[in-house]
Amino acid sequence: MPLGFYIIMAAQFFSALADNALLIVAIALLRDMASPAEYEPLLKLFFTVSYVALAAFVGAFADSMPKWRVMLISNTIKIGGCLMLFLSAHPLLAYAVIGLGAAAYSPAKYGILTEYLPHRLLVVANGWIEGLTVGAIIVGTVMGGLLIREDVSGWLLALHLPFVTSAFEASVLAIGTLYLVAAWFNFHIPDTGVDHKPLKNNPLYLIHDFNHCLKLLWRDKLGQISLAVTTLFWGAGATLQFIVIKWAEHNLGLGLSEASMLQGVVAIGVAVGAILAARFVTLRRSVRVIPLGIAMGLMVLLMTAVTNTTIAMVLMVVVGALAGFFVVPMNALLQHRGHILMGAGHSIAVQNFNENLSILIMTGGYALLIMFGLSINIVIVLFGLFVASSMFFVKLRHEANQRVKDDVGQLEDLHH
């Protein structure tokens, strides 16, 4: 890989690291404010609403200028959201602003891969970016868990940082520094030399263009399968973040700080699965990993019987590894089809719209279940059965498509 690829990865890592650390700190702040329990999953809902509401515009925005500049502007918006939290804005509102920056950031960070690298390296590149993103989740959730500990926050206060008067402000300032590091890497991302489309001034044209791209990708026989899988994965993954925290507190007796570290254990599994997929799965073989999604849903059901922390950690690694191994090839296939059909930025915007609509629906549904007082074990059973059955229907759909025409045989089958 060229040096520029690693700079892109570094920018993505530090930005995602800050996002995930801030989520844990925001949950802790909501608890200090004695907010209702359903507000916690609503953090994710507020974060992702921009992905859905602005999907028609962020893809065109990402394709209108060099991707490094888009990433820099988007990261600056995230810094603004972090500053709002520092200035005592409500966590839901501040995290929504950070989500706005993330929504604009995503088409650029993924789209630049298809501009910068040949198609045969997309699975490997996705293994890197998903592995590092998951690494950011691991380190970020652990960092967030540490920042809310009294001993760590007390040490930060003892540094007498400027404008810092509370442990919470010290934590937010530390996370804001990560966004600044990401901005520094944004400045050093190389220009790919790809021609850029001027941004249309008519919002109705952008909505019409996005709707066309949305239909185009769902009608494509390979695009619809990979889009269905990644849509389900990200909705399930976002919900699982909150399920793990609640489950760890209820079944394992862990506090928020320790439960957030258990989230990191899931992410370790995802990283392992992503690395293995990048090493062994070619683009042509990517669709063969769909059954692992069914296995992941069934594996989640075992959580209800686990009360031992060590066994819980092993189970979380296995669930994460299954998830990582099946989503990376699907993501690469989706980017490949999207790049061919409509261009990198537009295809990623379509992907983000579907994936984050799934996050809105699934985290919103989880918040409703918690509000209605369902036990976490019942929620886990419903969640696992939903994931397994959905992946089974996707598998049936793909097999039906293949009986009509063998689209998989046209994909590259090169070893990396």
Image (cartoon, rainbow, N blue to C red):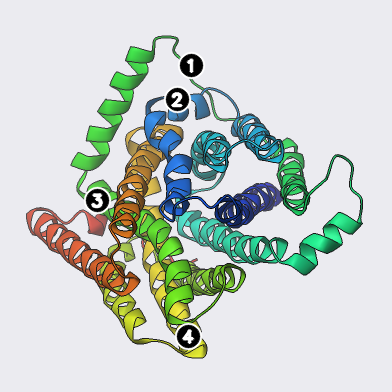
Q: In the rendered structure, which disc, 1 or 3, sits on the residue that comes first in sequence?
A: 1
Where residue 300 sits: x, y (%)? Answer: 33, 75
Residue 60 is marked as: 2
Q: Which mark is residue 104?
A: none
Question: Of helix, strand and loop, which one carries label 1?
Answer: loop
Which residue type does callout 1 highlight? Leu
User: What secondary structure is marked by label 4?
Assistant: helix
> Circle 3 sits in a helix, a strand or a loop, which is it?
helix
Label 2, label 1: how far apart the Cα atoms are:
6 Å
Tell me which amino acid carries mark 3.
Leu
Please give left or right for residue 176 compared with residue 310 in the image: right
Check disc 2: other Cα within 10 Å, few if <14, some if 14-19, many if 20+: many
Image side of residue 100 versus residue 42, left or right: right
Q: Which of marks 1 and 3 is in front?
A: 1
User: Where residue 13 appears, x then y in whole percent?
Assistant: 64, 54
Question: Which of pointers 2 and 1 lies earlier in the amino acid sequence?
Answer: 2
Which numbered circle lies on residue 199? 1
What amino acid does circle 2 point to?
A: Ala
Identity, as a three-letter code, of the amino acid under mark 4 = Val
Q: Name the residue under label 4.
A: 314
The N terminus lies in quadrant: bottom right
